[in-house]
Image (cartoon, grey):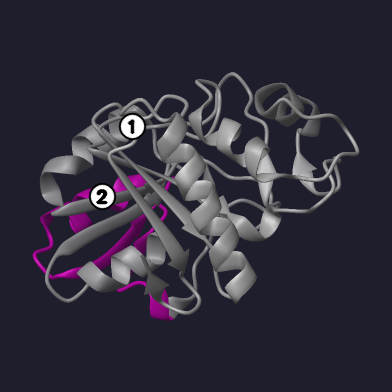
Amino acid sequence: MMFKLAEELRDSYKVLVTTSTKIYTPLKEKYDFICTDESMFSTYISMKEKGVYILGLGVNEENKILGLSEKHLASLEPHFDYMLIEADGAKAKALKGWNEFEPVIYSKTTKTVGIIDIQSWGIPICEDKVLRSDIFCEIAGAQQGETVEIKHLCKVILHPEGLFKGAQGEKILFINKAEEPKEVILAKLLARQVTFMDNVFLNRLILGSIKTNIYI
């Protein structure tokens, strides 16, 4: 999602793509400039070229770029037209429960995008499929061993300790992976339930698929 947005901005703006946690080093075609040495940041700050800039504080043994602190982000912000910051990860699992320190959202964020994988509907709630499944159950009102239902996803979206925990600025929900007709129906059902229960919490709601590039 982050690199999809970056690609749309790439030709017209100077775009910083980074993380406050850790992200895998992206493929070379996804960026124009990359720097993981803090001592070299000043070089990229002064550059005027449009494009996607990846900045981080190093690369670990998993080939993940180490994220920037609040202080780093504040110092970089004036030098970029857009900053896209990955603030939360789930170790490649479709759903998760959040620790106290997650997500790590920059305090001056203007738009927080929360992403729900509609293809998580029907998966079993267990640690193999859901990161920190015990915390997920508390948030979603579920039990270990149950399958994920629309009501669980709805609670995860709207719960104060859920998807938008610590969100700043405009809150945008994106229901992703609605690719097959059944998934589109489920995504619309979730969207209706969220908006029915939502007391003007969300500013925008989008459903669709990054893969197919179709959105509603």
Which of disc 2 and disc 1 is earlier in sequence? 2
State the SS at label 2. strand
Q: Quadrant of residue 75?
A: top left
Query: Which residue occupies the foreground of this view, 68 or 86?
Result: 86
State the SS at label 1. loop
Magenta range is 29-57
User: Residue at 22% of width from left, 33% of height from top?
Assistant: 74
User: Residue 140's x, y, as percent?
Assistant: 68, 29
Is residue 211 rendered magenta in the image?
no
Is 88 drawn above or below residue 177 in the view shown?
Answer: above
Decide if residue 112 is in sight here: yes
Which residue type does callout 1 highlight? Answer: Tyr
Query: Which residue occupies the foreground of this view, 182 or 65?
Result: 182
User: Residue 92's x, y, as percent?
Assistant: 68, 55
Q: Is residue 43 left or right of residue 174?
A: left
Is 18 drawn above or below residue 11 in the view shown?
Answer: above
Q: Which residue is mark 2?
A: 83
Which residue type does callout 2 highlight? Answer: Met
* Quadrant the N terminus occupies: bottom left
Query: Which residue occupies the foreground of this view, 154 or 131?
Result: 154
C-alpha distance separating marks 1 and 2 = 10 Å
User: Residue 175's x, y, as percent?
Assistant: 49, 55
Mark 1 touches mark 2? (CB < 8 Å): yes
User: Residue 71's x, y, as percent?
Assistant: 30, 28
Disc on res. 106: 1
Decide if residue 63 is in sight here: no
- Disc count in the image? 2
* Quadrant the C terminus occupies: bottom left
Q: Is residue 180 left or right of residue 53?
A: right
